Image (cartoon, rainbow, N blue to C red):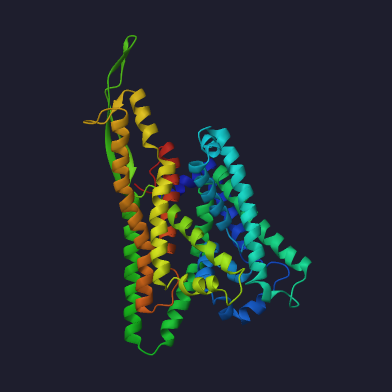
Amino acid sequence: MFSTLRNAWKIPDLRKKILFTLAMIVIYRLGSTLVVPGLNINALQANIDQFNSMEGLTAMVSLMTGGAFQRLAVFALGISPYITASIIINLLTMAIPYFENLAKEGEAGKRKMATYTRFGTVILALVQSIALVNTLFRGYFVGGAPSFLDASLVVLVLTAGTALLMYLGEKINEHGIGNGISVFIFAGIIARMPSDIGSMISSMLDKGDNTVNIFTFIAFIIIAILIIVGVIYVTQGTRKIPVQYAKRVVGRKMYGGQSSHIPLKVNQTGVIPVIFAMSIIMIPQTIAQFLGPANGFRVFVEKYFIYTSPVYMILSAIVIVAFTFFYTAVTFNPVDVANNMKKNGGYIPGIRPGKPTSEYLMKTLNRLTWVGGIFLAFIATVPNVLIVALNIPFRFGGTSLLIAVGVSIEIAKQLEAQLVMRHYNGFLK
């Protein structure tokens, strides 16, 4: 492991990518601690219980922003608007022919879709900023009730913070190790771990029954270890579809005849469905903030859209499974794979080329997607049930561990690929 790190550090371009990514993370953490001009963080700390009254919204936003939301920081919105905008653009590619054609135009189409995603991110960030300024943040302005200029300044700073995060994430994709958005979420989760663990231990020590406290603590550690092992096992799981290429004679040379395989992962989508589901579930909570305290919709959201509610757990599980299928359909097209195999003289033993091959791939992929989607939903929801049952005041649950472990594996694989290209042993050796 350490020799691998030394070898990686000796590679100039890989070292530059790592340093560039670390620099972007430093900027992200700095923006997560700088309070927005015009807001009073001391007033928030004095009324933190009132601020956390809508626990579902504040807990999820704090998870996505690494605690920046509860510090009234410049990056208080985090990268959630960008994720939501990406979801909308991907949905449009399946509903509107114009966006469907853009998705098929290669790099030019991707650039146009990226531009639409950026505009959508800014619009969503602006809407969410206005919602926060008029609801949760309204009581924490310096000098009391804000003027129009004060509120506009805060809205502008919050929107600009999200736009800057989006820009930094794209730069990590271009000049860093990749997965810029996931890296920021991962960094936020890791940054919160010490404080969350400390609050859990201190809360347990404040209780009277030390035997129960030790039992619950050990039980939680076991659950966390099982989640980590399960995530690694399922993430690495792959179904290999054998492919045989027919022999072809071109001139005086013979091509083909070799065997290969198509790797279909059990978890084809990584942690993206969980992040998408969290962004979608936050939409009704954001809308509820525009409504009065006595509004029926807001009362419903505040009652049921918290992590302890069975409605929230069931809804999040359904959304995770649905987005697992959706994102798998976006990233893997069995028809294109079957057509490419047919053009190159490849076939799956026992399956005819063309449509039968695509149907076989789709059937196999659907089975794997069901397993991967149910696993993601299980990891994201069941730990919340156990945490509530064991009465552990700890918010670093299944979703956090799933994102942290999943992103760690993705980063390790990317570094592994860079090292293998240079004939070094990698992290996974």
135 over 317 or under it: above or below: below
What residue is drawn where x is 53% and y is 68%? 57
Where does residue 240 sit, x and y in percent of width and height? 28, 40
Residue closest to the far bottom: 208
Q: Residue at x 45, y 41 (%)?
A: 418
**422 shown above or below 395:** above
Outermost residue, front side: 296
Q: Position of residue 419 (x, y in %)?
A: 43, 42
- Up the image or down, 283 lies above or below 221; here it is above
Q: Residue at x 66, y 61 (%)?
A: 158
Q: Is residue 286 visible?
A: yes
Q: Is residue 31 visible?
A: no
Residue 260 image position (x, y, % from top left):
29, 32
Badge count: 0
Q: Is residue 410 above or below residue 304?
A: above
**Residue 41 found in image quarter:** bottom right
The image quarter containing residue 211 is bottom left
Q: Which corner quadrant of the image does residue 146 belong to? A: bottom right
Q: Specify whether 35 is left or right of 329.
A: right
Q: Residue furthest top?
A: 251
Q: Residue at x 69, y 62 (%)?
A: 155
Q: Position of residue 50 (x, y in %)?
A: 58, 80
| Horizontal side of residue 428 vs 171, given as left or right | left
